[in-house]
Image: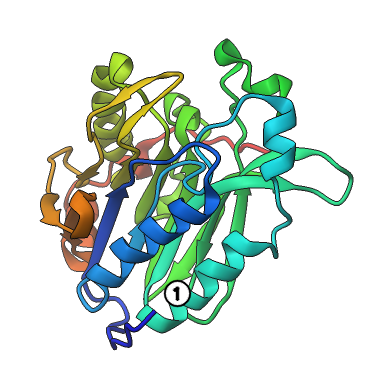
Amino acid sequence: MTCNNTRPHLNGPLTVAAIGLDIATSDKKANLKAASTAIEAIAGHADIAVLPEMFSTGYILQADTARNLAEPSDGPTIEWAAKLASACNLAIAGSFIALDHDGRLFNRAFLTEPSGETTYYDKHHLFSTGGEDKVYTSGHKAIPTIRFRGWNIALAVCYDLRFPIWLRNSHNGYDLLIIVANWPDSRAYAWKHLLIARAIENQAYVVGCNRTGSDDFGNYSGTSAIIDPKGQTIGTEAHLPDGIQCVMGRISHSSLYEFREKFPVLLHGDRFTID
């Protein structure tokens, strides 16, 4: 861990990196090492590094295996993220298998800032078609909004993407929506177009970070994307060590608010709230 770069610019543009790790199933040490390699390579060039869903273990649906790999919110994955975020002066987002104090398991997303402050979100829409609800407990708190370098950032996980009401951007509450995922190629068409739809309807930037490689659920060819509020793909491929796939994009606060003022769609929306 050698990076030490300064990059704070409140309300200015942000550079976001979606890192498509080829996750080694159940090998936390190898996955954290690969994530470190990628993040250290983009230090000084990015403000936020986004990692896939369950990036430190792979997407685990075997109850015994999940419990063996689970950790508390102050466990090794978040400890690792806090140290690296501080050293590289960027925020790190992803999700991991969390063990709550009462023994329940959650698919817990996080965003860790350079200060070490970490915001959590427990995946609400569990993929019951694959049996995720048999292993994990659904979170019931709304998606969080995190203030980072002048931006309002929301955080959600994979299957949540299919539920527009859950991700509704009430009162322009967020500027950037981060989705961490383990979304196989067999449903890649839906992934791409749902990311675009969420960006357009919420007038926000959307970053979708998906893994690469393969696991028991399918193949992942590299479909991470950064979408602007008009639905255009703006990310470009970055070349990282060890062939790690990464999409990086620069997002503009001023462009976002100019677009919202010119075309205030969300002001005309129906009024309701989600508890």
* Residue at (69, 40) in percent of width and height: 106
Q: Where residue 91 sits in the image (x, y, percent)?
A: 41, 69
Q: Quadrant of residue 274?
A: top right
Q: Where residue 163 sits in the image (x, y, percent)?
A: 48, 25
Tell me if 262 is positioned left or right of 88 in this view. Answer: left
Using the image, determine if residue 183 lies above or below residue 246: above
Question: Which residue is most to the top?
Answer: 129
Q: Which residue is mark 1?
A: 84
Q: Quadrant of the N terminus?
A: bottom left
Q: Where residue 109 sits in the image (x, y, percent)?
A: 55, 49
Whether residue 21 is visible, yes or no, is yes
Q: Where residue 249 sits in the image (x, y, percent)?
A: 17, 57
Whether residue 140 is visible, yes or no, is no
Tell me if 126 is positioned left or right of 25 in this view. Answer: right
Using the image, determine if residue 12 lies above or below residue 194: below
The amino acid type, in three-letter code, at marker 1 is Leu
Disc 1 element? helix
- Depth check: 185 or 226 in front? 185
- Depth check: 143 or 129 in front? 129
* Residue at (12, 48) in percent of width and height: 234
- Depth check: 216 or 209 in front? 216
Tell me if 192 is positioned left or right of 101 in this view. Answer: left
